[in-house]
Amino acid sequence: MTDRTWRGYWWEAATPEVKIPGILRCNEEGEVRLELVGGFDITIRKPLPDGNGYSVSSDTRDIPLIHGLSGSERFTLLDNSCLHSSGLGFFDGDITRQDWSSIRALRGVHLESLDAPIFIRAHLRLERLLHWSNQSAFRLSMEMREGELPRSKQVNRVEAEPVTTRHNDIEISLRLLTRDFQYEDQMISNERSLSGKESAVLTFTPPHPVPCKHFDEVEKDMQDLLTLSTYEPCGALSRSLTYMKSEDEPKEVEVIGRQIYRTPGQKKRSRGTDSLFTLADIDFKDSIPRWLDLKEKARTGCNILFGLRYIERGYVGTRLLGVATAAESIHAALRSTSTPLTKQEYKQLKNKILSVISDEPQHLVDFVKTGLRNNPTYNERMLELASIPDNEAVETLLGNREHWATALKKSRNDLAHANERSSQSDESSQAFLLMEVTYALLCLVLMSELGVSQEVQRRAVEMNSRISHISREFKKELSALSR
């Protein structure tokens, strides 16, 4: 996406009579910025106790909704904060320039309220979605003779049936969009071309009209699923909403705004096919609701985990602490009833200890009452986590899982408590390898909980080039340290 600009007039949704000229800009990263020639009065006034006048706060107010008109195109800017104002302002004269940052812009509608339930559908195009869908609307056939190059090739356009499922009353469908073959004869340049194009899109349809932010969570969860399955950060290529402009006229609205992740332009034509799994390995109808339930159950841990993919910069130690925290959170969510002792054993043990110290000072009794917990240790959590996926896949990935769990526990404790040895070690490569294999293990855990077969889990570890390389290097490091 290149930088885009729209020139027009802009006003607060609450005061449409005050219109100000300006330019709306959206850069390649999706950042939305409004540059006004003039400005809105954003001072905060508070009436004085005696009713004679008011005081002016040093703070300024944000504007929830700004409307705009560029030619015939309508815009609504959401959650707007003033970046800069120039001019004499409220006390002595007019503002000459004002710049605003907007979290999101809707192109094609004047939204009267953030909570207005008018949208009947949402469309989402994600990076790598077409490859993940394991579908194509094009069929290529070739006539071959042994020992010769293909004598002829034929491409046919066929119908690809959409796949559909439901989750919490929202219908979710995946379908392919195709463009008919285009023939172009460029006489001057001495060229002739024939081309076709297809893409995949997810559509979310609620049972009744909903507000504009209603789809945010399910769209983000589907983005995370693609990031999990392709083992690469997947950004949103485009988002749109649909509302009924009139009784029989649907209107599509483009959603513009900064994304969690966007692949740099030079990488968009990558041919990477190292996916952990695709729709060739799972069923869309059953797996999507199961994934959305799983994501809801382990939301905090998953957000930390996939955040490490969306934002790949940062100190290795910080990122290692992040994946260690994600592992603990995911275990607590998926195995919330896991305890070292049964409830009966724990209750009997605690009562026995309390009876022995009944004549001790109250603060010691209180310490046992509140401090003695029936929770697994971090090491026990990690070993149970490693027992969730296919055993052979885990053995291939980690080698000795006890050594892995001990290394992760030690690193996590050192980093979390800022121990001296965490800053003295210069073995950043060891920390990097530990972080990467732990990330890969958590992906296997989520795949197992999603219902991905043992064979596909093994294939993911053996065939994904990044995982197989990291696994080999990690096991070498462990072997060297254990000598």
Image (spheres, helix red, strand yellow):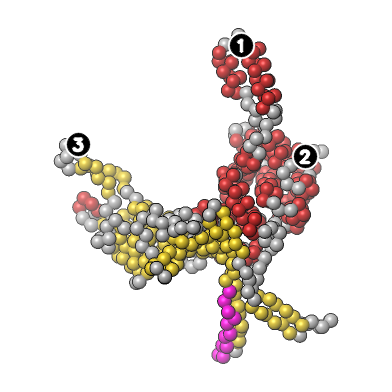
Q: Is residue 182 magenta?
A: yes
Read off the residue under disc 3. 49
In the image, residue 11 lies at what x, y percent? 30, 60
**Circle 1 Cα neighbour tier, 10 Å, few/some/many (<14 / 14–19 / ≥20):** few
What SS does tag 1 mark?
loop
Residue at position x 71%, y 59% from top?
281
Residue at image mark 2: 481
Q: Which residue is mark 1?
A: 358
In this rendering, the label closer to the viewer, 2 or 3: 3
Three-letter amino acid code at the position of disc 1 = Ser
User: Residues in magenta?
Assistant: 178-188
Q: Position of residue 16 (x, y in %)?
A: 27, 60
Density class for disc 3 (Cα within 10 Å; few <14, some 14-19, many ≥20) is: few
Q: Image height check: is 422 above or below 436?
A: above
Q: Report if residue 422 is visible in the image.
A: no
Identity of the residue drawn at 43% across and 64% down: 243
For badge 2, the amino acid type reads Leu
Q: Looking at the picture, does residue 482 appear above or below residue 397?
A: above
Name the residue nearer the viewer: 151 or 6: 151
| Frontmost residue, 344 versus 278 | 344
Give the Cα distance between marks 2 and 3: 73 Å
User: Marks 1 and 3, how far apart in space?
Assistant: 60 Å
Nearer to the camera, 230 or 170: 170
